[in-house]
């Protein structure tokens, strides 16, 4: 500072003194002893632990931090070093400068850590390094021992059910679970008649899973528990928890007749509605007036209702004439245009002259000559209480639901797709009560895949993977290749393959 | 010759004693061993006086003196002053001075010709020193420390200073004092030279922690090996006789 003030400072050379112990000339320091003498005087590692015993679980390679925590760490990793340093006592007297592992044979059950510590002694800071030896003892951790004792044991179970005759919802939910990795804690997954069972080893995992389901589907759940064992001395109670989750039976493309109360509460929405989208709320659309509304899970379960007709009962129609109107609506992300169409059932076409004039919401997509799928109310025998409650309701003859690409698909003969889906590791319940028809499952799965191709908003939450086994068919050059909806290449994820295959073009 | 001793298990002998060429002051301790060591070494040459200053035993740090005089702080009691006047030889002028910095032993380092003082000492005190001790006074610092009396000890033959003194400072001080100086330690690496030892032209007393290396440095710089007390005292006596005549 004086130099900055401009004062003249004489250059100071430090002289040398003799070390007070050994007499060798040295630079004066705070202790006025040479380093060797100081080191021989003071051992700063005195009183520090040099030998520690640690517990290690051979099954899951975890290390015990008393009293109860098990820390997972690999040999010679950062976590293991941190754990080893935490196990040393008396480290507050010295300052730790550096720590590293010294290599030891893994079978020797010894870990060696070299530490450099600093301590102030006689006014000078002395640094010394020393080696701490850890003896590793094998000790099975509580979770591994529990699994060893009874591998099928579960503490919490989530029973997911939907009382409909198809499994489309479960395919979709399976894909959502895979994308969000929600079932990572599940120790077992079982497929049963009208649902899936998930088993967890921890109640909180099950609760988290149920909350995840609540975000993706309109569910109603209840929770029950069963006492397994209890320790009267420490008042510990062990339960088996069961969460019973029911998904609402309304699915996409269902035709619903709303009960009068519900219709009134939704603003006199025409009692016949179509369900267009199901996420954690249900979107209902009146195909004749294009009015739409959405019901969330709580609202639905207060006054629950069943669908009138579901996608199994879809019948194919051929469109003869379309008259679009100006009414256009954007409901739940899709655009609908009201139109009057003349349709005939494909089974009638050519055989008789039966033509229906109906209103539909698919005005944007249909043009004469197209095929569409819809519900045949003309020929249907509906046995619904709610329908009877609506007096004086004039049922339309048909309600169109979606455009059909069936003919074109048959022409294309495409056996396999450019993309594929992953699946959950499920145990299939093969008892006679829960037997699921194999062929029915396959056709439903195929239908589900087609649904994914046709609907981009369905694909939104799902991860699609590039199918390496895809062989493009010879008919790929046919001009109408663009008509059939397919998944664009940008939406596919490259399947992470850790083998040595060369990666194909990576997509987002 | 340099002697190692302790005052009541404490190695800072320079705090509890004051040694000059004409007299030696010793603090009153619990056991007589401290006093008897000094007596064994010096009794037949110079008077060894047991005293206290201002009721304390830290007499080495409170007073400053050489063969010509002794300066005492204002806190010295009248009885102590009288006792010292009675015990010391008549040619030693005992003077009590009024000075804000009362630890004169820490502020003043002197031999029979030159004195180094604390830079903040009063002007009157400086004149007193020059007058009573018969020395030339220089205001100085040692290795950046203002307490010159604590961090150096010098006699008419040589001097020992704080180990961190730079070479330029050492040269400057040596020129001022006209004696060879060395930077070193006492009492096993202690930098407080003035407190750790006390020395005159033929003998030195150090704390018992002093290592052999330090002792050899002390003996070399103060030229104690060939020193004989009689030669120096005889010189003094000669000058004394001169003055009577």
Image (tube, grey):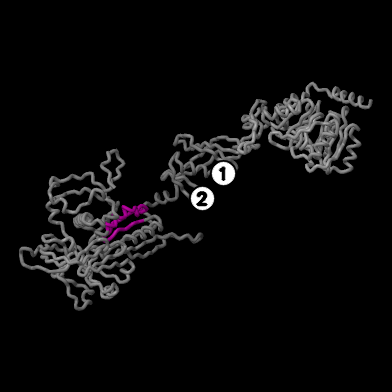
Residue A281 quadrant: bottom left
The correct choice, above or below, for B222 with respect to A427 in the image is: above
Residue B74 vertical placement versus B156 (above, below): below
Quick one: A360 or B69, which is closer to the camera? Answer: B69
> Left or right: where does residue A211 sit relative to residue B32?
left
Taking B236 as reference, is A100 left or right? left
Q: How many marks?
A: 2
Tell me where residue B50 appears, x and y as whole percent: 86, 37
Secondary-structure class at tag 2: loop
Q: Which residues are magenta?
A: A170-199
Residue at the limit of the structure toward the front, as seen here: A6
Q: Are marks 1 and 2 on the same chain?
A: yes
Location of residue A316 by image quarter: bottom left
Q: Chain of mark 2?
A: A
Q: Work out whether residue B195 can be spotted.
A: no
The stretch drawn in magenta includes residue A174: yes
Name the secondary structure under disc 1: loop
Q: Quadrant of the C terminus of chain B?
A: top right
| C-beta proximity under 8 Å, tags 1 and 2 | no
Q: Chain of mark 1?
A: A
Q: Position of residue A459 (x, y in %)?
A: 26, 55
Give the residue number, with chain letter if any, for mark 2: A67
In the rendered image, which residue does mark 1 sit on? A89
Give the side of residue A356 with respect to residue A492, left or right: left
- Is B128 in the magenta? no
Above or below for A115 versus A294: above
């Amino acid at each position: 500072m004086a130099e900055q003030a401009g004062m003249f400072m004489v250059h100071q050379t430090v002289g040398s003194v003799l070390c007070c112990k050994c007499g060798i000339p040295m630079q004066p320091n705070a202790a006025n002893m040479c380093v060797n003498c100081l080191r021989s005087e003071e051992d700063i590692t005195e009183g520090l632990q040099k030998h520690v015993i640690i517990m290690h679980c051979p099954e899951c390679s975890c290390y015990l931090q008393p009293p109860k925590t098990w820390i997972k760490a690999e040999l010679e990793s950062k976590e293991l070093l941190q754990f080893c340093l935490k196990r040393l006592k008396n480290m507050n007297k010295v300052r730790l400068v550096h720590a590293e592992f010294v290599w030891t044979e893994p079978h020797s059950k010894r870990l060696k850590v070299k530490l450099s510590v600093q301590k102030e002694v006689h006014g000078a800071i002395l640094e010394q390094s020393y080696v701490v030896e850890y003896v590793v003892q094998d000790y099975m951790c509580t979770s591994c021992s529990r699994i060893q004792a009874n591998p099928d044991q579960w503490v919490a179970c989530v029973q997911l059910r939907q009382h409909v005759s198809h499994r489309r919802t479960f395919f979709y939910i399976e894909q959502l679970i895979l994308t969000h990795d929600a079932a990572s804690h599940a120790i077992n997954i079982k497929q049963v008649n009208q649902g899936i069972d998930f088993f967890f080893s921890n109640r909180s995992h099950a609760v988290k899973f149920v909350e995840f389901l609540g975000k993706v589907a309109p569910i109603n759940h209840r929770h029950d528990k069963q006492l397994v064992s209890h320790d009267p001395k420490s008042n510990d109670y062990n339960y088996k928890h069961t969460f019973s989750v029911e998904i609402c039976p309304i699915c996409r493309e269902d035709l619903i007749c709303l009960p009068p109360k519900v219709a009134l509460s939704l603003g006199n929405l025409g009692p016949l509605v179509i369900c267009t989208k199901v996420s954690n709320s249900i979107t209902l659309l009146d195909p004749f007036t294009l009015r739409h509304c959405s019901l969330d899970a709580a609202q639905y379960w207060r006054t629950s209702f069943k669908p009138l007709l579901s996608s199994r009962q879809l019948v194919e129609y051929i469109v003869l004439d379309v008259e679009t109107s100006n009414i256009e609506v954007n409901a739940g992300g899709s655009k609908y245009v009201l139109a009057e169409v003349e349709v005939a059932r494909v089974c009638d076409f050519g055989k008789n002259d039966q033509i229906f004039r109906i209103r539909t919401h698919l005005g944007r997509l249909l043009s004469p000559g197209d095929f569409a799928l819809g519900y045949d109310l003309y020929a249907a025998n509906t046995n619904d209480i709610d329908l009877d409650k609506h007096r004086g309701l004039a049922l339309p003859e048909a309600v169109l639901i979606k455009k059909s690409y069936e003919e074109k698909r048959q022409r294309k003969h495409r056996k396999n797709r450019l993309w594929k889906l992953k699946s959950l590791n499920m145990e299939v319940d093969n008892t006679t009560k829960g037997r699921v028809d194999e062929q029915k499952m396959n056709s439903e799965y195929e239908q589900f895949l087609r649904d994914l191709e046709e609907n981009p908003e369905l694909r939104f939450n799902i991860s699609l993977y590039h199918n390496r086994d895809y062989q493009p068919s010879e008919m790929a050059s046919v001009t109408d290749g663009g008509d059939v909806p397919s998944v664009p290449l940008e939406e596919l994820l490259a399947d992470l393959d850790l083998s040595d295959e060369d990666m194909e073009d990576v997509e987002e | 010759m340099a002697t190692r001793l302790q005052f009541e298990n404490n190695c800072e002998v320079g705090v509890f004693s004051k040694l000059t060429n004409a007299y030696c002051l010793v603090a009153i301790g619990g056991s007589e061993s401290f006093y008897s060591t000094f007596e064994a070494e010096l009794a037949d040459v110079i008077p060894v006086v047991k005293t206290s200053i201002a009721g304390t035993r830290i007499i080495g740090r409170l007073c400053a003196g050489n063969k010509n005089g002794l300066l005492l702080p204002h806190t010295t009691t009248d009885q102590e002053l009288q006792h010292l006047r009675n015990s010391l030889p008549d040619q030693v002028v005992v003077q009590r001075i009024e000075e804000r910095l009362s630890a004169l032993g820490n502020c003043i380092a002197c031999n029979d010709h030159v004195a180094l003082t604390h830079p903040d000492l009063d002007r009157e005190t400086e004149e007193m020193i020059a007058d009573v001790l018969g020395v030339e006074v220089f205001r100085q610092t040692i290795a950046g420390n203002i307490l010159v009396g604590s961090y150096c000890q010098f006699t008419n033959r040589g001097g020992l200073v704080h180990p961190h003194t730079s070479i330029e400072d050492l040269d400057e001080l040596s020129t001022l004092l006209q004696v060879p100086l060395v930077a070193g330690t006492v009492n096993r690496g202690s930098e407080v030279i003035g407190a750790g030892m006390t020395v005159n032209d033929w003998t030195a007393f150090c704390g018992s922690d002093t290592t052999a290396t330090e002792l050899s440095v002390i003996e070399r710089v103060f030229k104690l090996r060939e020193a004989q007390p009689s030669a120096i005292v005889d010189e003094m006596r000669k000058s004394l006789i001169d003055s009577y005549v």
